[in-house]
Image: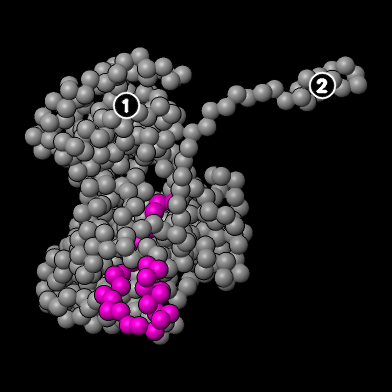
């Protein structure tokens, strides 16, 4: 029961669908699902989902005081990274290390490949700053702030709005970074990411990579957060004020029985971090947003499984764009140094393996073999059955074999969002594809062949996080969720020899449900340098005179 009469919302904005769970003032949960990208109908799917559930008519503002909190996961930063559509970024680095991040660790994932494709750098321009602090703190060279000012002014005039500052040994001796950062903010850069604040740990490459990612993605994220807050009738500043303690004067007025006129409380806006914890909107950074939605799915998978009495779980989250699989045996598994879309970063993330096999994965026939994905039809235009001129996708294969029935789907398709799934169009398209293949198979057989390929891809993804790491997957319970998971869960379990499966009532919205189950978390990192003294036991002798 919400004592203040307000709604709470838990939202997962995925690549294809946006899932919304609202908790009404009486405590009841209501669910809503809508396309993430539907420009003819609305601007932002998350805000529209809120408006739909509380009954706000088009063009009308959200009433003040009706929303208590919004907990949200978003793919905005992930998509910007995948599509390389982040903010134009300038890298300031110690003189002599211009190419340090490009060289990286000199790792060769494919050791016998003769054609080496180097990863694309996120920064657009590099400026070497003639400064140097030694590892012991000795200042060898002070930065020339006049020269730095000229370079920053030129970059700002060229349209670059984000700057990443990475100096040698700044994880411990950060004064030079602080002075240059203050100069960048004074000149007018809206986004200044400083390595000793973003990732204050030893190793230049890891610290630099993470700082560049933060500078590249944070402006995109902040604009989205500000837009969501504005559409809900609040602001990030108001959100900050809403989480502050109540003024003592207000408490005194209540004790005296006097009535003071106060404005309705602003909604508290929180976002899910890649580590599986919630943070306030004004603290949400680009480096923490890469696995924002999938991390909530792991929390939802683990907590619902634990409540049902299962301690060993395999998470199988099949959405519209991809399938995320995860392993849980009583503790969350996290990685602290990861690579996403060819970009290295050092930030705590849930350990999730993703394969490009979702309901929107496009079906291909190249004249010799079938292939599912990795490209996706997304939300716009979506699969063929969405009536937007999209290609044949895995969802269409399930329509073709009868696993998806249009009568059980809401009539939200077509130009007016009032038509059912286009089953006839799907049958005609598969019949045409069967004629193109020309081996006598029917359209249903072709669709079934594509489904088998997708199931094998997803089963192999689960083997990678379980069997290949020494876990006996047959002793685990498959916790199936995601909008497309139920269509393939039994086939995947059979392929892996699993005998137990859990499907929660909110399975198709479990990542959104996980937002409500997650805790508010803060992660702090600090480098510690200490002399390692020899242990006394190493110097002791055994009775035989031999060292122990």
Up-down: is 465 above or below 258? above
Q: Nearer the viewer, residue 287 or 490?
A: 287
Disc 2 residue crowd, few under 14, some 14–19, many 20+, Cα 10 Å? few
Report if residue 1 is visible in the image.
Answer: yes
* Label 2 vs label 1, nearer the camera: 1
Q: Residue 239 in the image: x percent, y percent?
A: 30, 63
Where residue 501 sits: x, y (%)?
A: 53, 68
Quadrant where the image shows the N terminus: bottom left
Residue at 40% in and 81% down: 256
| Relative depth, front residue between 271 and 509 | 271
Q: Residue at x 33, y 52 (%)?
A: 284
Image mark for residue 176: 1
- Kind of element beneath mark 2: loop
Image quadrant where one finds the C terminus: top right
**Farthest residue in the left direction?**
157
**How has the structure been colored for display?**
one colour
Measure the alpha-carbon separation of dots 2 and 1: 47 Å
Vertical placement of residue 542 versus 356, above or below: above
Q: Which mark is residue 540?
A: 2
Task: Look at the image and give the residue range highlighted in magenta.
Answer: 247-275
The residue at 27%/63% (across/down) is: 238
- Counting residues from the start of the chain, the first of labels 2 and 1 encountered is 1
Residue 171 forms part of the magenta stretch: no
Which residue lies at the image location 60% right of the left edge and 24% below the top edge? 531
Q: Name above or below for residue 525 compared with residue 132.
A: below
Whether residue 248 appears in magenta in the rendering, the answer is yes
């Amino acid at each position: 029961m919400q004592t203040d009469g307000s709604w709470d919302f838990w939202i997962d904005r995925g690549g294809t669908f946006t899932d919304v769970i609202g908790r009404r003032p009486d405590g009841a949960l209501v669910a809503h699902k809508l396309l993430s990208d539907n420009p003819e109908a609305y601007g932002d799917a998350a805000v529209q989902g809120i408006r739909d559930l509380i009954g706000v008519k088009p063009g009308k503002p959200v009433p003040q005081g009706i929303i208590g909190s919004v907990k949200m996961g978003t793919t905005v930063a992930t998509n910007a990274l995948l599509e390389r559509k982040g903010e134009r970024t300038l890298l300031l680095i110690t003189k002599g290390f211009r190419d340090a991040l490009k060289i990286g660790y000199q790792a060769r994932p494919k050791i016998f490949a003769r054609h080496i494709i180097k990863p694309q750098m996120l920064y657009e321009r590099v400026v070497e700053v003639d400064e140097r602090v030694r590892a012991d703190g000795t200042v060898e060279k002070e930065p020339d702030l006049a020269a730095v000012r000229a370079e920053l002014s030129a970059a700002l005039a060229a349209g670059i709005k984000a700057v990443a500052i990475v100096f040698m040994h700044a994880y411990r001796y950060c004064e030079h970074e602080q002075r240059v950062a203050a100069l960048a903010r004074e000149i007018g850069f809206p986004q200044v990411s400083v390595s000793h604040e973003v990732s204050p740990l030893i190793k230049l490459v890891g610290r630099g990579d993470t700082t560049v990612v933060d500078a590249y993605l944070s402006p995109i994220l902040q604009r989205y957060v500000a837009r969501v807050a504005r559409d809900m009738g609040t602001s990030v500043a108001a959100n900050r004020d809403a989480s502050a303690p109540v003024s003592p004067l207000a408490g005194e007025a209540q004790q005296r029985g006097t009535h003071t006129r106060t404005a309705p409380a602003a909604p508290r806006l929180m976002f899910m971090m890649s580590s599986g914890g919630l943070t306030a909107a004004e603290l949400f950074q680009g480096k923490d947003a890469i696995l924002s939605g999938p991390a909530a799915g792991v929390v939802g998978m683990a907590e619902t499984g634990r409540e049902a009495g299962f301690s060993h779980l395999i998470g199988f989250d099949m959405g519209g764009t991809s399938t995320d699989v995860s392993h849980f045996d009583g503790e969350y598994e996290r990685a602290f140094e990861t690579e996403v879309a060819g970009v290295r970063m050092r930030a705590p993330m849930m350990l999730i393996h993703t394969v490009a096999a979702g309901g929107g994965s496009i079906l291909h026939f190249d004249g010799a073999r079938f292939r599912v994905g990795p490209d996706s039809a997304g939300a716009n235009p979506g699969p063929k059955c969405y009536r937007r001129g999209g290609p044949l996708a895995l969802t269409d294969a399930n329509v073709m074999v009868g696993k998806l029935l249009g009568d059980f789907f809401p009539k939200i398709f077509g130009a007016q969002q009032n038509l059912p799934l286009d089953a006839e169009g799907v049958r005609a398209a598969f019949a045409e594809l069967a004629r193109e293949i020309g081996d006598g198979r029917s359209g249903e057989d072709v669709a079934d062949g594509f489904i088998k390929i997708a199931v094998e891809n997803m089963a192999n993804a689960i083997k990678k996080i379980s069997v290949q790491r020494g876990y006996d997957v047959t002793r685990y319970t498959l916790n199936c969720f995601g909008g497309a998971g139920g269509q393939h869960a039994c086939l995947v379990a059979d392929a892996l020899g699993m005998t137990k499966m859990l499907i929660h009532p909110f399975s198709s919205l479990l990542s959104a449900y996980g937002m409500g189950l997650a805790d508010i978390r803060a992660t702090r990192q600090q480098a510690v340098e200490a002399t390692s003294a020899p242990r006394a036991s190493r110097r002791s002798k055994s009775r035989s005179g031999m060292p122990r």
